[in-house]
Amino acid sequence: MKVFGLVAVFVVGLLLLSATQDFPSWGNPRSAASDGEVSSFYIEKTEAVTKVPNMVTAVLADFRGYDTMFETVVIFIAGIGIIAVLRNFEGSDSSIDYDNDDNGAGLLARFTCSLILPFIQIFALYVVAHGHHSPGGGFQGGVMLGASYILLALAFGLSKAKRIFSERRTMIFAVVGIFIYVGWGVLCLLLGGEFLNYSVLDSILPGDAMMARSYSMLVVEIGVAFTVTAIMFSMYSNLSTRGRLSKGL
Amino acid sequence: MTEHFPILILLVPLFGALIVVLLGRERPEQCWVTSLVSLGISSIISLFTIIVVFSDKVQTIRYRMGGWEPEANGYEVGIELRVDILAALVVFAVTFVGFVNTIYSKTRAEAEVQGKVPFFYALIQLLIVGLCGIVMTNDAFNLYVLIEITSLTSYALIAMGNRRAVLSSFNYVIMGTIGASFYLLGVGYLYIKTGTLNIDDIRMVLGNDNLWEHQSIVVAFIFIMLGVWTKMAFFPLHGWLPNAYAYAPSMTGTFMAPLMTKVMVYVMIRVMLWLFGYEFVYSGQHVWKELIIWMSVLAIVAGSLLALARTDIKKMLTYLIVAEVGYMVGGAWLGNVTGQAGAFYHILSDAAMTFCLFIAASIIVLRVGDSRVNAFDNLFRKMPLTMIGFTVGALSMIGLPPTCGFFSKWYLISGGIEAGQWEYVCALIFSSLVNAIIFFRIFERAYFGKIAGVKEDLSPSDSDANPDTGIKEVPWSMLVPLFIASGFVLLLGIMNRTLFEWIQTALEVMNT
Amino acid sequence: MDPIIANFIEENIVPKFNYWIYVILMMIGLYAMITKNNLIKKLIGMAIFQTAIILFYVSIGVKEDGGIPIISHHGPDHHQETEAHSEAGSENLKHNIIDKDKYANPLPHVLMLTAIVVGVSTLGLALAISQRIHKSFGTLEEDEILNKLRPGGHD
Amino acid sequence: MIEFSIIPLFTWLVSLLAVPAILLFRKRPDAREGITFLAAFLKLGMIFMMLPLIREGKILHFQFGEILPGIPIEFRVDGLGMLFALVASSLWILTTLYAVGYMRGLKEHDQTRFFACFAISLSATIGVAFAGNLLTLYIFYEILSLSTYPLVTHHGDKAARTGGRTYLSHLLGTSIAFVLPAMIYCYWKSGADINFTDGAFLDGKIGSSDGLIVLLAFTLGFAKSGLMPFHSWLPNAMVAPTPVSALLHAVAVVKVGVFCVLRVFTGVFGTDFLQKLDVGTVITYIAAFTIIVSSLIALTQDNLKRRLAFSTIGQLAYIVLGVSFLSSNGVTGSMMHIAMHAFGKITLFFCAGAIFVASGKKYISQMVGLGRQMPITMIAFLIGSLSIIGLPPFGGAWSKWYLFLGALDADQTAMAIVLVISSLLNIAYLLPIPVNALFRSPPQKGKKGSDAGIKEAPLACLIPLCITALAGLLFFLFPGLGFELAELITK
C-alpha cells in the first residue's frame, strides 16, 4: 500500500506540475483569470451596480448568490448529517445527573469568559453587518457567534449552554437561517423577477434597484449567520459528547 | 411561469427538507407525507419541464440566477441554469425515483433508522436537490458545490446503516473527497486559462484562443475525468461502492444505487461534450480514447465476474452497477452519436432497472431474513408478486426484449460496431451472458426451491395456493414502488425510439 | 550548480513557486489519505489536501500591486464616510475609473469561501462517522477493524 | 401484392389472450382446457381465413409501434410463414388433446402453469412465423425460449433442473452471443432496414468474409435448429413431459429454429446473393456432419425419447442442408420437410408418450412384443417411421426427393450420397422399434404380470396419434398446398 501510495502520489504530482509550464507566474496581473472579462467586470462594475464596495461580498451574495445558498445548505447538511449519524437519543434519558459532574471549567475561566463573551458576540454581529464594507459576512460572523456559544459550553458546561441554546432551538435557528435566504429569493420570484434577483425588490425596499441589492445582501448574510451559528454549536455539542449531548468534554 | 420551472424543481424539496426538520422526531407520519408531497410536486414540475422543453419554441431553458445578464462583454457574470431535453429527462428520473422511493420508505424508514426519521427524509430530499442541481447547472464551480451536497448527504445516509455501512461510508468520504477535489482542481486549471466558470463560455474561450493543445488543459481534463470517475465508481476506482450500497439502510440503497452513478455519467457526458467539446475529447492527438474504451471493457468484464462470484444478493447487484458504469463510459467514449445517445439512454434505463432490482432485493432480504442467494428458494410460489417485479428487472439486466435493457444494449452495440470497437461489443455481449447466468441461477432457485425430487402434489386439480411457510408478500407501500419501477422498465423499452430520437437530436448538435 | 538545473529553477520554480508549494502540500495530504492506517490521520491528510487546493485557488487571484478587493475611495482612515453614502458620493463613484490592477481578483476568494465551508462540513461529518466507527469497533486503526470483520463477514 | 390486414395480429393474439383466462379458471380443469381448445380452433380458423389470400400470392401485413428507428413490430404473412403457421396451429390442437389425456392420465401437478405456458409458447411461435422483420423475429424467438423453460423443467426434480439449465444456457446464450450482434451489424450495414418486406435486405451490401461470419453467426445462433455443436440442449430437454417433447420437436421450438435459418437464407441474404458470395458450402458441410453424426449417435440410444431426439437433430439438419444448396429445389425440399417431419415426428412422440402412459416403459429394449397389447400405437409408430425415412407412400418421400434434387442442382454429389447414407441410417435406428414390437414375441412371457395388463393408452392420447399418422399418408397423396406455398418463396 505504501509503495502504491507513493507511486500514485508522484504520478499525480508530476502531472499537476507538468501543467504549470503554461501557467502565468505568481502575481501576474495579465493572466487570463485576473485580466479576464469576468474578473474585470467584478472589479470595475460591482460598486456601480450593487453599491457594495466589498467585491467579495457582492460576488458571494449576489452574483454567485445561488452558490452561497447551497453553501449554507452544505453547512445545514453537515449539521443534520452529524445528528443522523451520531446522535444517540436514548442516551439523553440517563442525563438526569449530568449537572453534578458537568460544571465546566474552573472559576477563573468562567469569570473571564463571562467578561469577554458579550464582546465576542457584539464583534460577531459587527462582522455580519459590516460585510459590505470590510472583510466579513455571514459565515465569518456566524462562526464567531457559534464559537462564543462553544466557549460558553466549555466554561460553564454543556448543560448551561444547552439551557440557552437547546437542541430544538439550534434546529429552528438553522432552518430559519436557510428559510430567510431561500425565502428572500422566493420573494424575488413572487415579485416577478428571477430567483435571487434582488433588484425587483426595490418596490418594497427604500432606494433604487441597486440599493435593493445592497440591502438584500445584508438580509441573506443574516440568514447565513443564523444557520452557521446554530450548526457550529450543534456540531460541537454532538462531536464532544459522542452524540449523547449529556456531558461535555 | 414556465421559465421558472428549473428553480421550482429545486426549491420544493428544499423547503420540504426544512419543514421535515422542523416537524421533528415526534411526527414521523407527517414527515413522510411532507416529503411525499414535496417530491410529488417536484416530479410533476419536472414532467412539465420535459413538455416545455420539448416544444419547438423553447428547447433550452436558460435561467439566470439573480437576473444577471451576460454583462461582462458577453460573458456570464452570474450562475446560469440550463435545461435542455437531456437535463429534463434526467431531472425527471431523479425526482420521480425519489418520489417512488419515498412511498417505499413509508414503513422501512421507521424500522431502519429508529428515531431519526425526519433527518432521513431531510437528507434524502436535499440529496435530490443536489442531484437535480448537478444536472441543471451550467456553471463549473456550482457543479462542484452541488457534487459536494450530494456527497455529504450520501455519506450521512449511508452511515445511518449498520457498522459495516459506517465503515464503508468512511471509505466513501475519503474517495469522494479525492474525487471532488480533483474535479475542483480541474476547474481551477480551466479557470486560470480561460478566466470564466460558465460551461458554455469556457468552451467558447477554449475554441477561440485554441487552448486545446495546452498541456494544462489536457491535465485539467484528466483530473476532471478522474474526479467524475471516482464519484461514479468506474472500475479501478469502484472500491467504495459495493459495501456502501449493500449495507446502507435499504431505502437509502434503493435510492442511491439507481441514481448517483447515473447522474455522474451525465456529468461526464456534459463535461466531454459541453465543457471541452468533441474536437478536443475525440481528437486523434490523445491516446486516451482507445485507452478508456479498453478500461471500460475491463470494467464491464471485471464487474460482471465479480458479481458472478458474490453470493450476497445486494453485493451482487452493486457489482452489476460497476459493470453498467463501464457500459456507459464506453458508450460515451466511442466517439459517435449513436454511442453517446446509447450511453445516455442507458442512464435512464439503468436507473429504472437498478431501482426495480434493488427494491425487489430489499423486499426479499427483509421478508426472508437472509441476504444470500438461497433466500430465493421457492420464492415464485411464496412471493409471486415480488418475483414478477424482480423478473422484469432481471430480464432487462440480461437484455431481453421488450425491456429497456435490450434497447440500450442495442444502441450501445450499434455504436460499438459503427466505431469499429469490437472489444467493446464483445464485452457487452459477454456481460449479457454473465448476467444471464447470474439471474437464471436465481430464477432456478426461485422456481424449483430445494430439490424435492418427488412430485409434491398429485391431485388432478392442482392447487396453486401458497404453501404456508410464513413468508408472505409485503405491504402495498413496498409493492407499489416495485411495480411502478418494473412498469417503467417496460415503458422505457416501448418508448425507446421516441426517447432515443430526442436524445440523438440533442447530442448531434454538440458533435458538429 | 549545473546551469541547466539553475536555469530550470529560475524559469519554472521561482516565478511559479505557488504551484510547487500547493502540489507538494497536496501530495502530502494525498499520501496520508491513501496510506495511513489510522482513520484520524487520514482525515488530517484530507484537511491538508483540501487546504492545498484552497491555497492554489487563492494564489490565482494574486496581483503584484493588488490590494484587497474592497474599493476604498477615501483611503483607509475614512471609514465612517464610506458607510454613509451620500447621493453626491455615489454620483462620483460612477465616474471614477477603477484601476483593476490595484485590486486582487475577487472571484477565487469567493469560490474558496465556499470550498472552506465544504471542507469544514466534510471534516465534521467524517469525524462523526469515525466516532461511530470507534463506538462499533473499539478502534480507529484500519487493519484492526478489518481483522475484526474477518471472521463471519464475507468480503 | 402487399395488403394490410388485421388477421395476423389476432391470430397471434388469440392464444395470448387465452392465458389470463386459463389462469382464471385454474380451479376448474374442464373450463380451462375448454378455453385452450377454443383458442386453438380460433387460431386455426383464422389461419384458414388467410390461406386463400396467400395462395393468390398476396402478402398480408400488419404493423404497429415503431420500436427502433425504422423497425416496427411487424406481422407479415407470406408462403413460408403460412406453411409454418398452418403446421404449428393444426398440431397445437392435436397436442392439446393429447396433453389433456397425458396429463390427466399421469395426474401431473401444476397443470394450469403447463397450459398457460403452452399457450404463450404457441403465441410466440406464431409471432416468429409471421415476423416481418428480424427484430420481431428475435423478440418472439426469445419469448419462446423463456416460455418453454417451465415446460421443459415441469417435473421440478434434479434431472429437470439440469436439463432446463442446458436448455436455457444453449438457447439464450447463443441467441445473445451470436444473433444479437449479427442483427445489429445487419442493421448498421443495411442502413436501418431489417425488414423482410422487399426481398433480402442485405443483398449486395456486405462483403464475402463479413457475409460468411454473419451467416455463421445467424445459423449457429439460432440454436433451436439443433445444428452441431449447439445441439446438446435437445436430448437434455427430453426430461420434459411427452406432450412438451412433442411440442418442442415437432411444433414449436426446433421448427422455429430451422424456420429462422430459412428466413436468414431467403429473407436476409437471398439465395442469389449467397450464391454470389459463395458461402453456402460451409453451412452445407456443418449440416452434413450433423446429419451423419447424430444418426450414428441415435443408433446407440436405448431410451426411446433420446433416440428420437437425436433423430430430430439429424432431420433438422436436412432442412438446413436443403436451404444451403441455395437452389429452388433445395428450398422447396426444406419447406416441405418442415411440414412432413413435423407430422412424422409428432406421431412418433405421441406413440412414445402413449407407451409410457399405458405401460410406463421408456426403453426400446423393453418394447419388444409390445405390439400385441398396443397394436394401434405401434402401427402408427411404423407409419411415422416410414414417413421420416422418406419411403412412399408417405409424405416424407416428397421432401426427401426435393432435397435430393436440390443436391444435384447444386452439383453436390457428395451431399446426395450423404442423403442416401443417412436414409439408410434412419432405417437402421427407427424401423427395428415397431418391427420388433409387432412381429416378435415378448421375452419372458408371462413372467411379469404387469405386461399382461397393458392396454392401449386413453382415447385422448390415441386419437391424435392416429390423426397425425393418417396425415402422413394424406400428404403423399395431396402435397399440392405445400408446393404452392413453397413456390411463393422460391420464385
Image (tube, coloured by chain):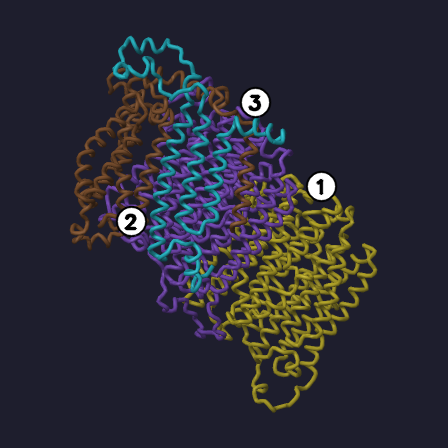
Chain colours: A brown, B purple, C cyan, D yellow
Decide if residue A203 is on the left or right side of residue A21: left
Residue assigned mark 2: B117
Labels 3, 1: one chain? no
Decide if residue A114 is on the left or right side of residue D479: left
The percent position of residue D56, horizontal first and vertical second, equals 66, 48
User: How many badges with numbers are in the image?
Assistant: 3
Read off the chain for label 2.
B
Q: Do the residues under discs 1 and 2 have CB atoms within 8 angstroms?
A: no
Q: Nearer the viewer, residue B134 or C96?
A: C96
Amino acid type, callout 2: Val
Q: Disc 3 on helix, strand or loop? A: loop
Decide if residue A155 is on the left or right side of residue D164: left
Q: Disc 1 on helix, strand or loop? A: loop
Q: Do the residues under discs 3 and 1 have CB atoms within 8 angstroms?
A: no
Label 3, label 2: how many angstroms apart (C-alpha)? 53 Å
The residue sitting at the bottom extreme is D447
Decide if residue D207 is on the left or right side of residue D105: right
Q: Check the image and report above or below for B83 versus D96.
A: above
Label 3, label 1: how many angstroms apart (C-alpha)? 44 Å
Q: Nearer the viewer, mark 1 or mark 2?
A: 2
Residue for point 43% across, 49% down: B171
Which numbered disc covers residue B334?
none
Labels 1, 2: one chain? no
Q: Is residue B505 visible?
A: no
Q: Residues within 10 Å of mark 3 (few under 14, many from 20)?
A: few
Amino acid type, callout 3: Asp
The earlier-in-sequence mark between 3 and 2 is: 2
Residue assigned mark 3: B209
The residue sitting at the front extreme is C1
* Residue B471 lies in quadrant: bottom left
Residue assigned mark 1: D205
Read off the chain for label 3.
B
